[in-house]
Image: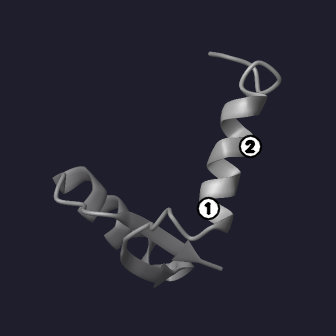
Amino acid sequence: MSSPSRNGGALRRIGALIDAGAVHVEAQALLPLEGRWRLIRVSREGRVRGKLIRSL
């Protein structure tokens, strides 16, 4: 695995894309901590499109 110091330029470019709104992350589910078992089940079923987000 590369160290962040070796990838500083790439990380800055990625940060600039995020700041510019060019990166969009699709969230499939936003569940409270109590719903963590559902998140695990959905993830293991392999039908996830986007990110599974657990809120605290």
Q: How is the image coloured?
A: one colour
Residue 6: image location, x then y, percent: 76, 18
- Per the image, the residue denoted by label 2 is 12
Neighbour tally class for label 1: few under 14, some 14-19, many 20 plus, Cα within 10 Å: few
Locate residue 56 relative to residue 35 in the image: left or right. right
* Quadrant into which the C terminus falls: bottom right
Q: In the figure, residue 52 lies in which quadrant?
A: bottom left
Along the line of sight, the residue nearer the viewer: 37 or 18: 18
Q: At label 2, which amino acid type do we have?
A: Arg
State the residue in front, 24 or 35.
Answer: 24
- Name the residue located 50 percent from the left edge and 62 percent from the top edge: 23
**Secondary element at image label 2:** helix
Judge left or right: residue 38 versus residue 9: left
> Disc 1 designates what residue?
18
- The mark nearer the N terminus, 1 or 2, is 2
Residue type, label 1:
Ile
On screen, residue 31 versus residue 28, left or right, reads right
Residue at the right extreme of this rendering: 5
| Cα–Cα gap, marks 1 and 2 | 10 Å
